[in-house]
Amino acid sequence: MLELAKLARSTFYYRQKAAKRSDRHAALKAAIKAIFDSHKGRYGYRRVTAQLHRLGRRVNHKTVQSLMAGMGLKSLVRPKKYRSYRGEAGRTAPDLLQRKFGADRANRKWVTDVTEFSLAGDKLYLSPVMDLYNGEIVAFETARRPRFKLVDNMLTLYNGEIVAFETARRPRFKLVDNMLTKALARLGEDERPILHSDQGWQYQMSAFQRRLEARGLQQSMSRKGNCLDNAPMESFFAILKSELFHPGTFDTVQSLDDAITDYIDYYNHRRIKLKLKGLAPVQYRNQPLNLPAQ
């Protein structure tokens, strides 16, 4: 048989012994698969490695990367971004952040934007606010069209850790207006963060700007066509769409809307960030005497 297979005797017996040996990474693979599945394929090898470290398994990230590749575990790909810029619709604001995205405490620097989801000929728009201190989504609003009211409501309601969210389906001021309502409710009397956005038409409207001025918030805007000026929000949208919005996953806009609410709760409370010492945003914020993220 060995002659027919043109296989050396030593090679044959080596392969037999190798086949009988148990996989020395079996337990590690099981742990990797459990982490990957529990986060619905949203974690790449870096976050899987960080989670393993938190569980007490000291393993090199290259080993995790190799094992995940061998197991066919690949995190999801990020799609393109919706652009809300429609030219000059009102008054723009200077860029106060200048790409300095760090914050030494909560509610000092906020960023916001609007993104679009297309589903079976229908659309859903999301308008969130992120706190740059810990990357937490402190308020959000959804709508069938990017109305101003979506953004305005987003700035007002405070309700636990996920401070607020709103949904809508038409491109009106109501989208942004609702978002603003929810986020403002989070603030203490003396808290007046910078609110940074792109130059989307909603943020240029005088009604939006009057609400910021009335509450003492400073408005900041990216330069036209410079997406990196609002990189944290861009990154959140890319993560959200790659980890949640998969083709064929949702049959209705309402089911997608519900899933966004669930995902933001997951993002705030369970999805770890490496720059937050391997903690989720709310976990990091709730730490006593924690230092600002690097």
Image (cartoon, rainbow, N blue to C red):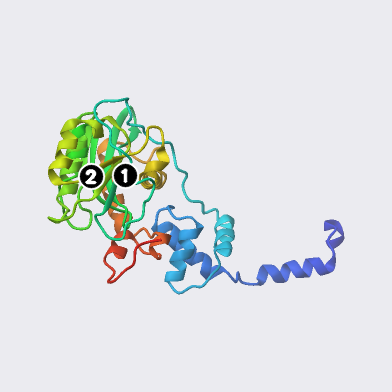
Residue in the image at 49% along x and 64% along y: 49
Q: Report the number of numbered marks.
A: 2
The circle on residue 218 is: 2
Residue in the image at 85% along x and 57% along y: 4
Q: Residue 187 appears at what percent x and percent y?
A: 17, 54
Horizontal relation, residue 188 to residue 31: left or right: left
Question: Is residue 257 or residue 62 the one in the foreground?
Answer: 62
- Quarter of the image for residue 172 reads top left
Q: Residue 37 appears at what percent x and percent y?
A: 42, 57
Q: Are marks 2 and 1 in contact (CB under 8 Å)?
A: yes
Q: Which residue is mark 1?
A: 96
Question: Is residue 40 or residue 14 the one in the foreground?
Answer: 40
Residue type at mark 1 is: Leu
The circle on residue 196 is: none
Horizontal relation, residue 261 to residue 245: left or right: left
Q: Quadrant of the N terminus?
A: bottom right
Q: Earlier in the sequence, mark 2 or mark 1?
A: 1
Q: CA distance from mark 2 to mark 1?
A: 9 Å
Q: Residues within 10 Å of mark 2 (few under 14, many from 20)?
A: some
- Quarter of the image for residue 245 reads top left
Q: Secondary structure at mark 2?
A: strand
Q: Secondary structure at mark 1?
A: loop
Q: Residues within 10 Å of mark 1 (few under 14, many from 20)?
A: some
Q: Residue 277 appears at what percent x and percent y?
A: 40, 66
Residue type at mark 2 is: Gln
Q: Residue 145 appears at what percent x and percent y?
A: 25, 30
Q: Is residue 246 visible?
A: no
